[in-house]
Amino acid sequence: MWEAFLEPLSYEFMQRSLVVAVLVGLICAVVGSYLMVQRLALLGDAISHSVLPGLAIAFMIGANIFIGAFIAGVLSTMAIAWIRARSPIKEDAAMGIVFSACFALGITLITLIQRDNKIDLNHFLFGNILAVSRPEVWQTALISALVLVVVILLYKELLFYTFDPLGAQAAGLPTNLLNFGLMLLIALTIVASMKSVGVILVLALLITPGATAYLLVSRLHQVMVLGAGIGIFSSISGMYLSYFFNLPSGPAIVLVVSGLFVLALLFSPTYGVLTQPQASSGESMVWRELKGLIRRH
Amino acid sequence: MNPTALPFQTNLVQQPNLSGQVEQTRMSSSAFIAVNHLSVSYRAVEALRDINLLVRPGRLVGIFGPNGAGKSTLLKAMLGLISNTNGSVLYHNKPLMHQLDKVAYVPQRSQIDWSYPATVWDVVMMGRVQKTDWFRRFSVTSRRVAADALERVGMEKYRDRPIGQLSGGQQQRVFLARALAQEPEIFCFDEPLAGIDQKTQEVIFEIFHELVTAGKFVLVVNHDLGETIAHFDDLILLNQSLVAYGSRQQVLTQENLYRAYGGRVMFAAGEAA
């Protein structure tokens, strides 16, 4: 058993991918907690889809694809904010428009490059963590350190801002700057995660660990710490599942984290579907929940 | 030119009979909040039209008016929280929006996501963020100020409770504690009395009166023209533009109420004066 656990570690590519998986699980959970509490899950999705054209253009001109992706991510949030401010279109519609447009552009560009280069669209869409290079490990480590330091240093300001933006602005905090900083953190995190889970599934690592932790603890820093633990655990176990059963690594990681969420949903001491005291017993849980759904709508 | 005189003069035109009180306040304090020609419009819709006010400290000021009169908008516009604002709001002759460290603002309860993962203590400590340097942890003093504020609103026992598990009145008291912890000169509350219990109402007015006695500015948006109106010293009666401003007795006339609310207001409100 123990040997089976250690066996993959003897390969250097597995060591590299495990380091990246741990880092990505960590920062996605921390930064994603801000998305969850601000009800901006869709923004995470929007940014992650929008990085594709930047990545493709960077590749075409021979620049660093991380930087290209980062710039595209930031530009897309600015486009969303601009559409919302300058037209009566609501934020969710603006996000939908921008991210699908960028995604389409990204796929088109990458398909064009694919013809002449050794570049695989699927690796960006779904990640290819087993192929991370040594410089990419360093880049991910650098981004992770930066993201964590900023979150720790600005913790109290970001807590105030994300809880009560108007109150924070009225207390004189530079809320526009904080918001922009948060967007930068999210874009950086997504860029760092691109390689491991891909732009389509990165949302799961951003939202699900924090949401799972939210069902179990009641303060933001606890959500972040527990979420990070859940993210790291999912990344490692997803990697092992992918190694032993020859599964794609990104989806394996996402399936583990989603499974953990379902467990928390069912068994959380405070919110758990199965652990909450119910007034009327005798009817089955499934029937009770179905009735509840119908009554609510 | 005496800077406080100008807004004061324009105000006098709109509200006769105020000179005695204003004179008295002017002698005791030179600090006013001067609102000059404040207007707010959202996409061609005018939400507030040419508001001129001279707000004095040491008075419990209620902002009243019907739904959509622009009460919350006035408060937010005064603090520079809304774009598309014209006019000026001066405090000590400088724009108030550049002195927000002297302001505590409590938004409407419905503006807040109460399922946010934070405890009562987390929220009260937010009141100390502005007093704490960037990148620094909260000081011992900050913790003491926050603890005192929590005690003052009678919520110290709930310190570690998630905010989502409190009643509406308790949530409002936590926000009041946060405002107290900010140690501001100007307190702004948006509908703090909406849907709260009797105990909370007593605590809130007791603290309002203490703050007023200590010479603070206290501005309160209120929706309800019921009996609580008797607690206020001055009233700002709004309906997009300023209908009346002055002491409660002067503002609560049938004519003013009719101008603000149309024919819909009950006579009971007039009697509260």
Image (cartoon, grey):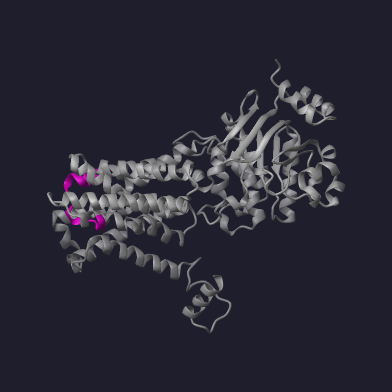
Question: In the image, residue A29 lies at what x, y percent?
Answer: 37, 53
Q: Specify the segment rendered in magenta.
A: A125-140
Residue lying at the far front in this picture: please name it: B44
Image quadrant containing the C terminus of chain B: top right
Q: Where A288 sits versus A179, above or below?
A: below
Q: Is residue A237 visible?
A: no
**Among all residues in the image, which is located at the extreme top?**
B1
Of the pair B144 and A183, the residue shown nearer to us: A183
Residue A115 x, y percent position in the rendering: 13, 52
| Magenta stretch holds residue A50 | no
Location of residue B196 by image quarter: bottom right
B137 to the left or right of B219: left
- Number of marks in the image? 0
Q: Position of residue B50 (x, y in %)?
A: 68, 33
Q: Nearer the viewer, residue B72 or B38?
A: B38
A81 vs A49, left or right, is right
Is A136 magenta? The answer is yes
**Residue B135: image x %, image y %?**
44, 36
Rendering quarter of residue A146: top left
